[in-house]
Structure formats: structure tokens, C-alpha cells
Amino acid sequence: TEHGEERILAQGGKGGLGNWHFRSSTNQTPRYSQPGMPSTELDVILELKVLADVGLVGFPNAGKSTLLSVLTSAKPKIADYPFTTLTPNLWVLDHKGKSLVIEDVPGLIPWASQWKGLWIEFLKHIERTWVLLHLLDMYRMDQVFTDYTNIRKELEYFSPDLATKEEMIVFSKADLLDSEMKEFIVSEFKKQFDKKVFVISAATWEWVEELKDFLIDNYSKEKILREEWYQIKEVKIYDLKDDSEDVPKRFNLEYVEWHKFK
């Protein structure tokens, strides 16, 4: 979980001492030796949690694959039946000269945290994301609130970390409803849940560019690393074109892994 972190899984044994170690002037060839201690033996299963910036979650057929196709250059399988996504996928959003990684996982159903459906295999991956993008099918209208609470329950059942992770709401398929109905659903949702809400249509590109701007400006890897760095380092910025005495004529440059500044 940390760069350079080490963890001992199996402790090595202690080496013994051979008869040569016990030789003396009176016992040139001792017949005594000390046996070593055995090492730890165990079978270990290592599972890699995929690291992404944004975790995309939602019910089957909520439009996750369609959304990915307009946010990124991905060409995921899109069909009018549930569970078109069977494995977790990572896709890159390139926008405004920055990028972030979006993880798409199979659709969630009630009791997924209890091994129902496909999602339990991949819930662990979204624990490593910065934020959850919760996609809700707006065309389900009154059921959209039940959809949201059901998925939230599964996240909470599976991991307390997921329950407290930052989350934004994206209503999809907005082109299928009139403006009055869309405003009503959003207002009722905000009354019950204090979340950042976007209303989009991947078919007509309604608010898609605004969603891209928001994701890149708030969750790109460069922004997150820069904020983390400023919390632990005092950074001074100099304009090399400035000839005043405040700008030193000599600089000591330090390489800080893969942090970038503009």
C-alpha cells in the first residue's frame, strides 16, 4: 500500500553451527554440530487490488459501458441486457492535457456482498479508488431512489471504507425524460441525500463535457499528488524570467518520484 513497503510473510530459519565452529586446541576435529531451526512454511494467496482514480458503480443496465464509451476512447460491450460487463476494466480519460483512470466493474444487485451475482469478486478493487461515481438510471424514475439505497447497503455491508468513500451521483439516460421530470427527480434526490449530482445523456452528450471537466479538475492523479505534496512540503515558485534580487541565481533541483508541477 506504500512505496517501498516490506512485509515478512514467512520467517526464514536459523542456521545451525557445524563441527568446525567447535574446534579447539584440544579438540581439532569435534564430532559435535548444532542443527538449525526450520523456517516457516505456508501457502499464500496474493490478490492484487487494482488502483484507479474513479470507481464506476451502478445497477446492471444503468449505462456504465455507454458512459465509458463517451468519456474515454474505450469500446466496451454495449447491449440492452444486464451483465454485459463480466470482468473489471480500466479505462483512461484524457482531457485538458490531464488524465485519470476509471474502473468499471460488473453491475451490482441486492445481496452482492453475500456472494450474489458477479460483483463480490470485484468489490475489493474499488476500495483503492479516490472517489465512487455512482451511475443511476434516471428512466427508472421512482425506483431510482431504491436503486441507490440498495447499492449503498451492499457497499456498507462489504467494507466500512467503501461506506465512507467520497461519492458523486450521475443520472443517466436524461434524454428519455422531459425537463420537468428531471428537475423533480434531482430535487427530491438532493432532499434525501447530500451528494454532488450530474444529469447526463450519453446519447445526446448532454452535460458530458461538464462531467469530464469536473472529473479532471478534481480527481486527476496530478492534482491529487500535488495536493498531497503541498501538505508535507513548503514549495516556493520562482519565475526564471524575473531579474529581481528575490530570485536566486543558483538552484538545487530535487527529483521527487513522479510528482509533476505546472
Image: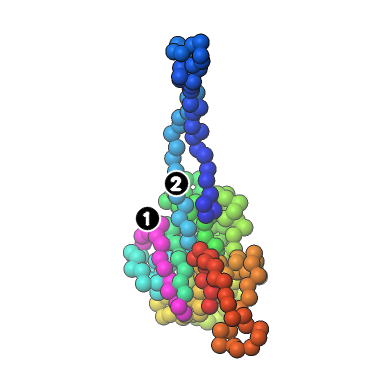
Q: Which residue is mark 2?
A: 47
Looking at the rendered structure, the kind of residue marked 1 is Leu
Looking at the rendered structure, the kind of residue marked 2 is Glu
Hey, which quadrant is residue 203 in on the image? Answer: bottom left
- Mark on residue 64? none
Callout 2: SS: loop
47 or 29: nearer the eye?
29
Q: Earlier in the sequence, mark 2 or mark 1?
A: 2
Report crowding for label 2: few under 14, some 14 to 19, many 20 or more residues within 10 A (C-alpha). few
Instruction: Tell me residue 87's x, y (percent).
Output: 38, 55
54 above or below 35? below
Instruction: Tell me residue 39's x, y (percent).
Output: 48, 28
Is 48 colored magenta in this rendering?
Answer: no
Mark 2 in CB contact with mark 1 (< 8 angstroms): no
Please give the name of the residue rendered at 65% of the width and 70% of the height, measured from the top-left corner.
Answer: 234
Please give the name of the residue rendered at 45% of the width and 55% of the height, measured from the top-left corner.
Answer: 50
Question: Where are the magenta residues, as a range?
Answer: 81-97
Instruction: Tell me residue 27's x, y (percent).
Output: 49, 11
Q: Is residue 218 visible?
A: no
Q: Which residue is mark 1?
A: 86
Distance Cα–Cα, label 2 vs label 1? 18 Å
47 or 82: nearer the eye?
47
Q: How many discs appear?
A: 2
